[in-house]
Amino acid sequence: GDAIGPGHESEPTTLPPTCQYWTHPLFLFRGKLEYHHGLGWEISKQEIADLSARLSRSVERRCNDYAPDGPYFASQGVPGPHRLLENTIESAWWSKHLSRTMAWLCGIGVVVAVILSLGALITAIAAHTDPATRTATSRIVTSVLMLVVSMGLVKLMFGYASFAKAAEKAEELAGARIAPDVTEREAIKVLHAYQIARTGSPPIPTYVWKCRRGKLNREWNNYRNGLIDDGKVQP
């Protein structure tokens, strides 16, 4: 996302930094790609041309830098409801872990800012500094805390945590519904619920995906091998 999917996902829930809003045409187009990869629905040349026309040259260059060097999803089975659910599991798994990482980072940022601010204030009071210094220190502390609020770190922390839970739920639901006789309607319903949750979530910065992709790729491969052993996904 984004953290879509994984062991091969060029960006789990993310695209380049300039593409970091879910209302961006690239993210809206991503939903069509999920149906294309999962169900084999064709994307017309007109849709591709319209998307290209809406992108600036700088965004096109950045997106080209993130072109995947392999399949976007690990599943290479026959397009259909089963593959769509496999892809949903993969995407949701990556989104879950990357969102948890972002929630932790935002939480750490809030805690550090509060501790440093209060520490500075307590130090100024304990040092018996003059009133002017204490006043200046309290203003700095207030400014720092206001900066934390204005940056939306607290809101982001809860937003990422909420999406991590929603992604986990989507992953579990897709895993529960996946079966040889699953219908297209059932598979689409699961993916659609996940897409709605993703649309309302904060985007995951590309640098977080870069930092975690190595470990998560290994963990995803292990997880997918377990799903293969259980007969839920195809090799």
Image (spheres, helix red, strand yellow):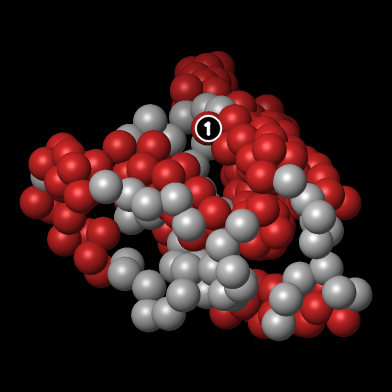
Query: Can you say which quadrant of the picture contains the C terminus?
Result: bottom right
Q: Which residue: 74% across, 40% down?
A: 186
Whole-percent x, y for residue 25 in the image: 30, 37
Residue 115 shows up from this direction: no
Instruction: Point out residue 120 in the picture as x, y percentages from the top left corner.
Output: 61, 37
Viewer-closest of 36 and 170: 36
Quarter of the figure with residue 46:
top left
Q: Under tag 1, what secondary structure?
A: helix
Instruction: Give above or below for 185 relative to 37.
Output: above
Q: Is residue 73 above or below residue 198?
A: below
Residue sitting at x 48%, y 57%: 40
Type of amino acid under label 1: Thr
The quadrant in which residue 222 appears is bottom right
Q: Position of residue 223 (x, y in %)?
A: 78, 74
Around disc 1, counting alpha carbons within 10 Å, would you say few (fewer than 14), some (14 to 19), or many (20 or more)?
some
Q: Nearer the viewer, residue 52 or 35?
A: 35
Which of the 4 image quadrants contains residue 138? Answer: top right
Q: Is residue 148 above or below residue 98?
A: above
Q: Is residue 186 visible?
A: yes
Give the left or right position of residue 75, taking residue 186 as reference. left
Question: Which residue is the site of mark 1?
Answer: 199
Q: Vertically, is 200 above or below 166?
A: above
Residue in the image at 37% along x and 52% along y: 42
Residue shown at the point (47%, 23%) measured from the top left: 150
- Rendering coords of residue 33 (x, y %): 43, 52
Q: Image check: 225 left or right of 57?
A: right
Looking at the rendered structure, the number of numbered marks drawn on it comes to: 1
